[in-house]
Image: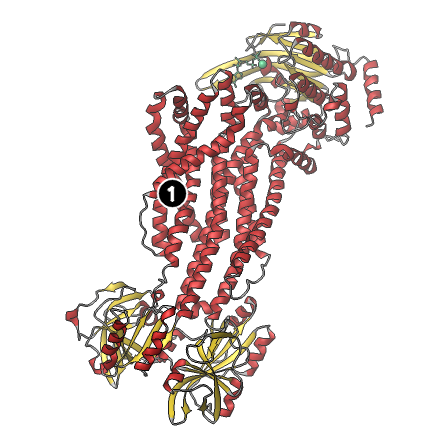
Amino acid sequence: MSERELEAGLESDVKAGRGMAASGRAVVEASGVSKRIQSGSTSLTILEAVDLRIAEGETVAIVGSSGSGKTTLLSLLAGLDLPSTGEITLDGRALGALDEDARAALRAGRVGFVFQSFQLLGGFTALENVMLPAELAGYADAESRARRALDRVGLSKRLTHYPYQLSGGEQQRVAIARAYCGEPRILFADEPTGNLDHDTGERIVELLFELNRVGGTTLVLVTHDMGLAARCGRQLLLSQGRLLT
Amino acid sequence: MSASASSFGAALRFSSRRLRRGWRSGELLILTLALVVSVASASAVGLFSDRVRRAVTQQSGDAIGADALISSRDALPQTLVDELRATGLRTARITEFASVVLSGEDTLLVSVKAAEAGYPLRGALRIADAPFAPAREVREVPGVDEVWIDVRVWQTLNLQPGASLQLGESTFRVTGVIEYEPDRGAGFTDLAPRALINAQALPATQLIGVGSRTQNALLLAGDEPALQAVGERELPAGARYLRPDKARPEVGRALGSAGQFLDIAVLAAILLSAAAVALSARQHGQRQRDEVALLKCMGASSRYVGWVLMSQLFLLGALAGLAGAAIGFVGQAVLAALLGALLDAPLPSPSLVPLLTAWGLELILLLGFALPPVLRARKVPPIRVFQRNVGEDRSLVVGALALGSAVALLWWQAGDPMLALSVLGGALGTTLVLALMAWGFVWLLTPLRRAGRTALRFGLGNVARRRGSSVGQVVALGAALLALLLLAVVQRDLLDAWRNRVPPDAPNQFLINIQPEQVEPLQAFFTQRGYRDLQLWPMARGRMVAFNGKPVTADSFDDPETRRWINREFNMSWTASFGDDNELLEGQWWTAADAGKPWLSVDDYVVERLGAKLGDKLTLTMADREIELTIVNIRRVKWESFKPNFFLVTPPGTLDAAAGMAQYLTALHVPRDQRGLLRDLIREFPNVTAFDIEATMNQVRGIVDRVVQAVQFLFGFALAAGACVLLAAIENTRAERVRETALLRTLGAARRTIAIGLVTEYLVLGLLAGLVAAAAAQIIAWVLARQVFELPYSWSPLLWLFGGVGGALLVVLLGWWSLRKVLDTPPRVVLASAN
Ligand SMILES: Nc1ncnc2c1ncn2[C@@H]1O[C@H](COP(=O)(O)OP(=O)(O)OP(=O)(O)O)[C@@H](O)[C@H]1O
Ligand SMILES: [Mg+2]
């Protein structure tokens, strides 16, 4: 796919209004989801009876106090782990029926991540880190995609730098470029601004929403930042493992 | 363009990219180093020992003047010679027979050897122009009208320079005195003095006719395959094929020990490399887990992850295999250059086959030790990106695989499953002992957790707090130190002792033909010249005619060696004292009171040949009388002493009937600058013959020396492998220590406090490991000395000192070096990059 075709494709998506729709096709659905952890003889319930539906192109913030189960919910929605009960559907596929590799294959090229602690590969340059998801998805033009993505986050001059040579904000921009590069339909972010100062956090948030605006990518954010949460189309409030809204 | 993420090519690209900076983590470097060392050692060992073995075989080939020979009573047919030549072998026929030479009126019985051009095929004759004149090396046979003779012929016949000798119908000019003849057997006392002539001159003497008693041999030299083929072919009736390691007992024994030394050195290097590979691979696997979780998050399948992990290892393995082979090649070349000056003949050029063996070995290392722990990381679930403790594991499978591979490894290298299993059993037992001792020591430290000042407490506390990891580390460090200590012990003590088994003052002169009435004057002669306590052995000849009352001849036995042996006359002796170079295996030695009893003491060679046991009776004819003797004890002679020794010995007085005809012989060490003494001796006792066996002795010493150097070189690789284990053990906890150190400094601990704490901890670990290693080294060295080298072992208290103090210092130095940067960089940087 050439760059022009890509841009054209994205614009047609936007024109069709898919990027804005809150009532479109569901990309993530959870019904009756709970998560229990057995440690020794005591059983700990982390999530209880969670039902939710996130439509394509939506921006959703998951908020709640520390320990309320936000990260756990996010990881279940992304298929990183399986719920104790209930069913989760990602991009139309029921995760319960898939083994770990099949879930990974489902994520490849569809799901992007941005983490609070950046999670870049220390042995890889910025460019190589960004190329990774595109390569995993089997795109032949992984490198040119990665260069464009880094350009979009303003790091075209730092391609050959390693993570330890970058500041925290720069590392998070590399992480976002990495998310761009795979052109995910859905992006999960766990406190993407948690480790950054306010201004830098603003820029990161800007970049995330741009992905949603231009590419129609669904955003699911976990955050403590109420300002950020308010910019999202919808807020889900978790309290002691239960969804209140 | 779907999720073809599992494609091997992508994984390969990924992992090669990854390796570019993967060196930064020490464990990959150590893993590679260990692989390089193992390939380098296996290939150097393979290449070099292959060459040494071929050279040593060639050198011991000197001892028969060939690589192999076919011996026969009858002349060997020309067709056989032609056929063997057609396979690429060089040949030379020799014929030996007893005859009389004439010089004017005098006659003398000699052993004539007629040799074809080309003789000797291996080694060289040493020929002098006159008796005791300087000799030169000669690799040819005399001219058709020439004869070379032993000094005994010269002396007995009172020859002058330019003399001639008549042999049968021909006359020969004496053009050389034989100082050394490579293929003269060890049984020199059997032989009349030598006269060597050209085989072309033999027919003209008319000495060889139908029915004459000759001994014929066809000497062979050439490639190993061609030589082996000879062993498999049909030979004329009565012909025997002999290889040198079977022909001469003392050379054979040196070769046997050489093989064992080389094997031990190789196995040590390989086992240590395996330990280093396993340690660093385990750590590498653990370090991969975060990355694996992230890859899976982004959609990588476990198959793809498996490919990544595997191709990474195999890329490393390929690099290490090439580097190791190159080092191995250079190593054996350097060694060959060093040893070249010592060699008579150049080492054969290396063959590349040992490289394949070395790479095969590396493959076993990779598949058995490196891959399983690394591949465990493949199982890490993606949720680990959020929960760090997920995906930690311990696996019995990995341990079992490593164990199986160790067996395969040892088997592959040693080529003997029993040896592999017993070495492995030894290694496992040692590890267990190390672990028990380490656990005990660490347990003893527990009360010290709260003792001492802050920094000390921190250091000691760390050892006691992390008991499991401390024990593991003491075992790993201990195993490495153990290897280093053992190498030092084996190299210094055992190899030296082995080398000195042929003592420097071993007799180099044999005097034979001493008449009974000359015993006392001869002793006086030597006492005057400062040689005290000269021992003389009486010697009489006998032939065995019955065994346990049943008549025997050579035909009573199937074994050709026994037949040959029975056919000869035995040299017998009698003595009251037990030789210090003898070992009593069974029965009792006699006392002076047993003089005259019909008893017999035999070397275990006789036991082997006859299947004899204590109480068996041998009937011998001696001087026309029959005498029946009962075996009362069995000895083993250490032939390396080079003193006269006899297979058959009786108490004094038993062989009185034969004693009148006895001759005496003695052996003594005459330093080179006192050789003039021998001339005086011959003048005063003209019938006594002096035999110089220095050349034979030096031959045996030369082989041993060469092997010792080879072994020391090979142990150098084992040393490098031991160092890898040491580094891997230290590296194993480095990451944890780096994070901890940075944290402590962030929390305000002074640099000095942390430094003292770390040094204390490493000091204690090193000390424990050193002590544990010293204890184990003593035990193993003892077993090695007794079982392999057959030497007494002296317990060395110094070993404890070296082990404990040396171990502590070494570990502190290495530990300090591995953490030096951490103490000098600001904690912020350390914490940032530790993420
Ligand atoms: N593997 C586990 N074992 C035991 N308890 C767990 C495990 N994983 C999560 N928990 C518990 O589940 C609860 C929810 O954890 P989670 O990480 O989802 O919280 P969170 O909402 O993301 O909190 P924070 O805002 O602090 O990141 C916490 O109380 C946590 O201690
Ligand atoms: Mg969280």
Q: Quadrant of residue B432?
A: top left
For the N terminus of chain B, give its image quadrant: top right
Residue B147 point in image, percent of width and height:
48, 85
Q: Is residue B778 visible?
A: yes
| Residue closer to the observer: A174 or B294 | A174
Identity of the residue drawn at 77% across and 11% down: A20
Residue B477 point in image, percent of width and height:
43, 37
Q: Quadrant of residue B86?
A: bottom right
Image quadrant, ligand 2: top right
| Residue closer to the observer: B811 or B446 | B811
Say if A170 sits above or below B160 in the image. above
Say if B830 sits above or below B187 in the image. above
Residue underneath mark 1: B429
| Local secondary structure at mark 1 | helix
Identity of the residue drawn at 39% across and 75% down: B558
Residue A72 point in image, percent of width and height:
58, 16
Position of B173 with respect to A29 (left or right) is left
Say if B28 sits above or below B426 in the image. above
Amino acid beneath label 1: Gly
| Residue closer to the observer: B168 or B103 | B103
Say if A231 sits above or below B666 in the image. above
For the C terminus of chain B, give its image quadrant: top right
Residue B51 point in image, percent of width and height:
54, 60
| Residue closer to the observer: B487 or A50 | B487
Q: Is residue B390 visible?
A: no
Q: In the image as oriented, which residue stretches furthest toward the left?
A: B593
Position of B584 with respect to B391 (left or right) is left
Return the chain for callout 1.
B
